[in-house]
Amino acid sequence: MTLAKAPRLANAARLATARLATARTFIGLLLAAQAYAAVTGTVTNQSTGKPQAGATVALYRLATRTGPELIAQAKSDAQGNFTINQTPQGPHLIRTAFDGVTYNHMLPPGTPTTGIPLEVYNASTEQGGAKVAKHMILFEPSPGQVQVNETYLFTNQGKTAWNDPGGGTLKFFLPAGASKPDVRAAAPGGMPLGAPVNKTSQPDVFAVDFAIKPGDTRIDITYTAPYTEGAEYAGRVVSKDENTYLIVPNGVTLAGTGLNDLGTEPRTQAHIYGLTANAYKVKMTGSVAAAPAAPAAAEARGDAAGGEDSGPRIEQIMPRVNSKTIPIMAAALGILALGFALLYRAQTTGAQETHERGRR
């Protein structure tokens, strides 16, 4: 090797070393950026149409056994923006709290974690645009008892969430001797969650504490009550319902006053009756498969005011009801929707015919 080549080789070696160090630094920074990638987004108040400051945005890891685990939380700034310096691995949940109401946003694995749009609403203790559009009561008698499944379908066409922790947003009647009610509530686009139940000053009337947000909300209440076949079973409707229906499965007959027979659902053969009053006294004959065992009635009614498992839960909870309940309710919803559509078409056609006769 000549002396002239030695400096060039040394310079080349130093240049290669510098490039390697730069590459290592870049890779390290890239890995660090991935390791500390943030969850970011913007909270918008749909009541005002503006970015919402001061909302609490919390990130939860969804565990299978121990339940949701809080990872970190942050406040939205004046522009509604938030940043949580965490990298979700696996399924996560973003829970936004504003004006006393929480809103859930799922983060399945592989979904973007930046620029997430979150929506909240102003809340009020006034009912506003919220109402019970449909209330369905399914009776499933078995020897010595009857299982009752009540489904309330709320619609809120306003821009304010109805939230009344003190008085509750839904009041329901629970007959004497009934088991502890199992309450599930699903917000618009959400999954069923446990909802707390509180006693009221009225005998045998309880209140569900669950915010009714703009959109469609479903609340399901399940309980068992003592019943002897052919005996009279009495109940009351204490909520303000636009439409109330009593339903019995195939093989069970229902008789009582103030009922409007709407026929049977073709697939499940469940029989549907419209209720024209705020109270009912019915007699049932026939039975279906026995419902799952329920807690002692006295203990259950004492716990209905809210025990350790009566608070809101984030994890999904499957209803503890007979296997026939869900398809019957789903089919009932379908036939009722079809019935309303046919009624609307009939009314529209009749109006058009009247108009044509008037023109002649």
Image (cartoon, rainbow, N blue to C red):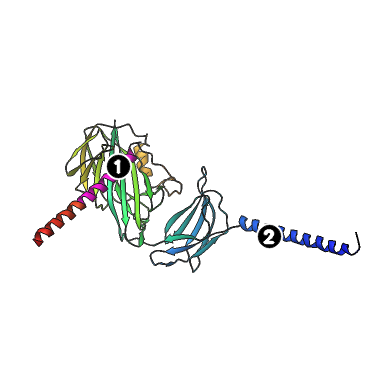
Q: Nearer the viewer, residue 151 or 347?
A: 347
Whether residue 202 is situated above or below residue 323 in the rendered picture: below
Q: Element type at marker 1? A: helix
The amino acid pointed to by label 1 is Ala
Indicate the position of residue 350 as horizontal and vertical percent values: 14, 54
Residue depth check, mark 1 versus mark 2: number of the one nearer the observer: 2
Which residue corresponds to mark 2? 26
335 in the magenta segment: yes
Q: Which residue has dot 1 on it? A: 331
Residue 16, given in percent of the width and then of the height, sits at: 78, 60
Residue 359 falls left or right of residue 274: left
Q: CA distance from mark 1 to mark 2?
A: 60 Å
Residue at 46% from the left image edge and 58% from the top image edge: 96
> Observer-nearest residue: 150 or 5?
5
* Dot placed on the residue nearer the N-terminal end, 1 or 2: 2
**First to last magenta residue range:** 324-343
Residue at (31%, 55%) from the top-left corner?
155
Amino acid type of the residue tagged 2 in the rendering: Phe
Q: Main secondary structure of the magenta part?
A: helix
| Viewer can see residue 145 | yes
**How far from the left and from the top, in percent, is residue 297?**
34, 38
Image height of 286 relative to 178, above or below: above
Task: Write down the quadrant of residue 262 in the picture.
Answer: top left
In the image, residue 292 lies in the stretch drawn in magenta: no
